[in-house]
Image (spheres, rainbow, N blue to C red):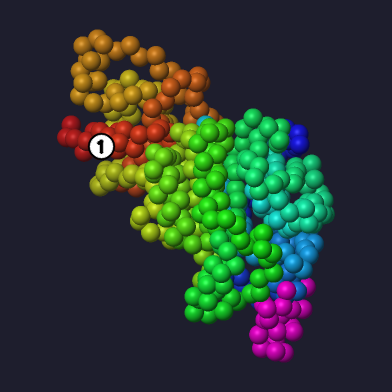
């Protein structure tokens, strides 16, 4: 399947937020007459019957229409009907992963950036490609599945939403490569996503249901291939991990959504075993009921913003190294602290540009040039700097004029008696911490 990017007119769409609360059924009824009809029936019986597949499907379709302008899904009775909130939270998190690890260092959505992603196990709904492509006009998504029945419905849903030029679907097999770059007709991908079956067997699935204090709030219509696979979600993601060790930088972000915190803990442990330190984790909870977790890892050296790398309610054991530090400068003005930062950076053999009007600067270093030995070398004429000046765009963001080795890049922002240091690029967290220590000493030293 040839899947080379095509151009499309960029749109300045507003960024949609995460679902953080339970769905407000009354508010949705005001916006959608089909859901209002469900609520009217519920008032007579005094409850919404989520054991009725038609009610579950209507909730999904009403949310898709009202929040994303996506046409109603066409689904068979024997395949999963996807709840929207957690699915959208997963897509939104991937958007933020890409937005905060671009070579522009902008930390925000670029409506002109093209991206190509792969959804492994697209399902009958094609929910992830629909959400991703409908909210990012320059994104193109490939979707694979081992089930032809699901793919037939997925194509209908893609066609019904006018996205067939940007969403391509293909049948695969359980023993084929999970990330088939050659079959997709591409050399690299911006991201891979998957929501694999959570359970290892029918017995495992029944045991999981039996261990819950309360029965599931909504009926599950998933088929065995949607709910069960060898090794469950951990086994499936470990297969992706093994392939990623071969593909490495050909995919910027490998990601997966997991059903249990214990699954996330196992995957993070495996990443650490392979010395993969650039990873991100998320709790995708929407409201008070369903919790899902996500993990992403990269062999590139661009570091996600800290609230993206450590998103949501998480336990300490799964957290990656923090990508930000704050240095307090009490009783000091922004102007004073900014001058101190600028002066400290100008003493170093680094790329540096400071924008005083916004009190933001970016520094790139090819090595540790702030150690005592490096400073001594520079002082006595040993400076052989070839670092070029960083250029800052009209919006106050930075970009490198030439491509050359960067061991560390950070953004420094001064405001409200504090200096925030954001780790943008690099593989060595010790180097980042060392830089922060140097900057703190420069800011707190007496003149």
> At which x and y percent is residue 384?
33, 11
Secondary element at tag 1? helix
At horizontal 37% and vertical 23% (from top left) the residue drawn is 366
Residue 358 visible in the displayed image? no
Q: Above or below — where is 180 with respect to 215?
A: above
Residue furthest out toward the left: 446
Q: Quick one: 57 or 308, which is closer to the camera?
A: 57
Q: Which residue is mark 1?
A: 437
Q: Is residue 331 magenta?
A: no
Q: Quadrant of the C terminus?
A: top left
- Residues drawn in magenta: 31-53
> At which x and y percent is residue 426?
40, 32
At horizontal 62% and vertical 32% (from top left) the residue drawn is 188
Res 123 → quadrant? bottom right
Locate residue 361 relative to residue 198 in the image: left or right. Answer: left
At horizontal 34% and vertical 37% (from top left) the residue drawn is 429
Res 85 → quadrant? bottom right
- Count the labels in the image: 1
Q: Quick one: 21 or 268, which is closer to the camera?
A: 268
Q: Above or below — where is 34 with respect to 40?
A: above
Majority SS type along the magenta span: helix
Q: Is residue 50 magenta?
A: yes
Residue 441 visible in the displayed image? yes
Q: Quadrant of the N terminus?
A: top right
């Amino acid at each position: 399947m040839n899947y080379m990017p095509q151009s499309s007119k960029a749109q300045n769409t507003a960024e949609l937020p995460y679902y953080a609360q339970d769905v407000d059924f009354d508010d949705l009824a005001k916006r959608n007459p089909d859901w209002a009809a469900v609520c009217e029936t519920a008032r007579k019986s005094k409850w919404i019957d989520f054991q009725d597949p038609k009610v579950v499907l209507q909730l999904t379709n009403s949310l898709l229409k009202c929040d994303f302008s996506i046409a109603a899904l066409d689904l068979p009775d024997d395949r999963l009907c996807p709840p929207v909130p957690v699915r959208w939270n997963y897509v939104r998190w991937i958007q933020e992963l890409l937005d905060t690890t671009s070579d522009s260092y902008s930390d925000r959505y670029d409506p002109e950036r093209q991206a190509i992603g792969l959804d492994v196990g697209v399902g009958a709904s094609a929910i992830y490609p629909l959400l991703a492509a409908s909210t990012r006009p320059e994104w193109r998504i490939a979707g694979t599945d081992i089930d032809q029945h699901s793919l037939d419905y997925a194509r209908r849903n893609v066609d019904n939403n006018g996205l067939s030029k940007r969403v391509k679907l293909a049948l695969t097999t359980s023993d084929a490569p999970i990330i088939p770059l050659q079959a997709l007709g591409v050399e690299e991908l911006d991201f891979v996503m998957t929501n694999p079956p959570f359970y290892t067997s029918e017995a495992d699935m029944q045991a999981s249901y039996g261990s819950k204090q309360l029965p599931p709030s909504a009926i599950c219509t998933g088929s065995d291939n949607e709910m069960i696979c060898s090794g469950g979600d951990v086994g499936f993601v470990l297969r992706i991990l093994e392939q990623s060790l071969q593909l490495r930088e050909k995919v910027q972000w490998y990601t997966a959504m997991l059903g249990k915190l214990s699954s996330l803990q196992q995957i993070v442990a495996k990443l650490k075993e392979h010395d993969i330190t650039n990873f991100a984790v998320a709790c995708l909870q929407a409201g008070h009921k369903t919790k899902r977790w996500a993990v992403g890892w990269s062999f590139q050296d661009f570091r996600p913003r800290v609230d993206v790398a450590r998103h949501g309610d998480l336990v300490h054991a799964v957290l990656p190294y923090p990508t930000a530090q704050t240095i307090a400068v009490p009783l000091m003005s922004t102007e004073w602290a900014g001058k101190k930062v600028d002066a400290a950076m100008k003493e170093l053999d680094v790329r540096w540009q400071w924008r005083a009007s916004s009190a933001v600067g970016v520094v790139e270093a090819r090595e540790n040039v702030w150690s005592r030995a490096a400073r001594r070398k520079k002082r006595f004429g040993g400076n052989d700097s070839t670092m070029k000046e960083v250029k800052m765009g009209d919006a106050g963001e930075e970009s490198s004029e030439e491509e050359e080795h960067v061991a560390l890049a950070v953004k420094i922002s001064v405001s409200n008696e504090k200096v925030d240091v954001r780790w943008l690029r690099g593989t060595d967290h010790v180097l980042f911490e060392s830089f922060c220590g140097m900057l703190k000493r420069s800011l707190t030293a007496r003149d």
